[in-house]
Image (cartoon, rainbow, N blue to C red):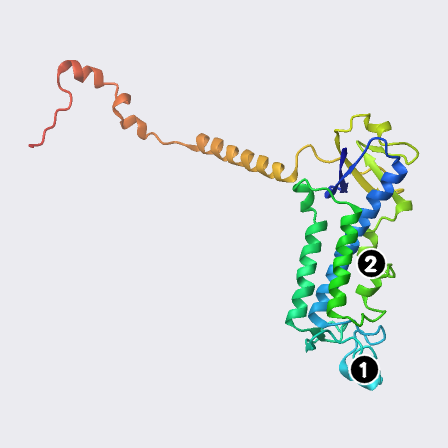
């Protein structure tokens, strides 16, 4: 199997196993699906943290308003009584005014938190450091675990406008957001290796040869952005160590140049009359009484 170390920019993403015979069209779709799937898991976990802390999202026309404004406009959240977490709720006001403040109790909160920790570990970038490959099945399993945890805490479901539900139903609106800029849809996805664009009409073997026991670094980015920047010869950590070594060496040389200590002249080996006194038998004579 050919092992791909997928990166976006200079940042490591995940490892993926494939073959030299795979068409680049199929490989690009597979890599883009895993890349975007991991982003979806991260977005859901981020919103689930808020769900665990402050309950479900308020209707769009109530978000960001104060209690006085809501009362003055006579607005009502019809989902407040429908979406009550299992075991009852604990009120924790959302200072941002996005959620209704009726958070799950401590036990249900732990269910959400534990599931989030487990799924984050599955799609973590540390998997690449541990030499563990990520597959689309792993990403789908992580999404299923998150969906299951939400159903345990909210068996009646979440409001249609809640970001967690919208993510599960693939109705999320990421336009104008930083999260949306990170997504690379399949039609716009490009893979690069060794400064070359891996064209979809070819196979992976057309670029790397027939050796299945190969490990290469490929970079994914949006079409039309040109070739990705080449990586530095040494890593940032190695560069820091090199600079520290150079700085210490410079300090040592500077101290040697400034060293004007002549105390060595008082030592026996530096005394020019030492040999003469030794022949005359007057060495180590002390004038004070013992």
Query: At 83% across and 31% down in the image, what residue appears?
Result: 20
Question: How many labels were placed on the picture?
Answer: 2
Farthest-out residue, left:
289
Note whether residue 229 is visible: no
Residue 14 at x, y percent in the picture: 74, 43
Q: Quadrant of the C terminus?
A: top left
Q: Secondary structure at mark 2?
A: loop
Query: At 80% across and 77% down in the image, what residue appears?
Result: 82
The earlier-in-sequence mark between 2 and 1 is 1
Mark 1 sits on what residue?
Answer: 70
Query: At 77% across and 84% down in the image, what residue appears?
Result: 68
Between 47 and 107, the one lying in front of the other is 107
Between 41 and 111, the one lying in front of the other is 111
Horizontal side, residue 111 vs residue 285: left or right:
right
Residue 29 at x, y percent in the picture: 87, 43
Image-quadrant location for residue 198 = top right
Residue 73 at x, y percent in the picture: 85, 84
- Position of 275 relative to 159 (above/below): above
Q: Quadrant of the N terminus?
A: top right
> On residue 177, which mark appears?
2
> On residue 93, which mark appears?
none
- Position of 212 relative to 70 (above/below): above
Q: Residues within 10 Å of mark 1 (few under 14, many from 20)?
A: some
Farthest-out residue, right:
201
């Amino acid at each position: 199997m050919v092992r791909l170390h997928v990166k976006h920019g200079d940042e490591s993403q995940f490892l993926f196993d494939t073959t030299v015979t795979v068409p680049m069209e199929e490989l690009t779709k597979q890599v883009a699906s895993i890349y975007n799937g991991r982003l979806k898991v991260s977005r859901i976990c981020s919103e689930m943290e808020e769900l665990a802390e402050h309950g479900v999202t308020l209707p769009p026309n109530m978000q960001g308003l104060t209690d006085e404004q809501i009362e003055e406009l006579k607005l009502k959240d019809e989902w407040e009584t429908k979406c009550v977490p299992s075991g009852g709720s604990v009120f924790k006001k959302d200072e941002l005014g996005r959620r209704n403040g009726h958070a799950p109790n401590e036990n249900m909160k732990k269910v959400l938190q534990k599931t989030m920790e487990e799924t984050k570990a599955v799609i973590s970038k540390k998997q690449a450091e541990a030499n563990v490959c990520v597959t689309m099945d792993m990403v789908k399993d992580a999404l299923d675990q998150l969906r299951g945890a939400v159903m345990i805490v909210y068996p009646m479901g979440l409001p249609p406008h809640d970001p967690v539900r919208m993510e599960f139903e693939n109705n999320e609106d990421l336009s104008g957001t930083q999260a949306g800029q990170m997504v690379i849809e399949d039609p716009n996805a490009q893979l690069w290796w060794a400064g070359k664009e891996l064209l979809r009409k070819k196979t992976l073997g057309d670029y790397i040869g027939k050796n299945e026991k190969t490990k290469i670094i490929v970079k994914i980015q949006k079409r039309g952005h040109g070739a990705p920047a080449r990586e530095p010869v040494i890593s940032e950590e190695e560069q820091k160590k090199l600079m520290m070594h150079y700085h210490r060496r410079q300090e040592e040389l500077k101290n040697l140049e400034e060293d004007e200590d002549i105390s060595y002249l008082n030592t026996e080996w530096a005394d020019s009359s030492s040999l003469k006194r030794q022949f005359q038998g007057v060495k180590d004579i002390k004038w004070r009484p013992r």
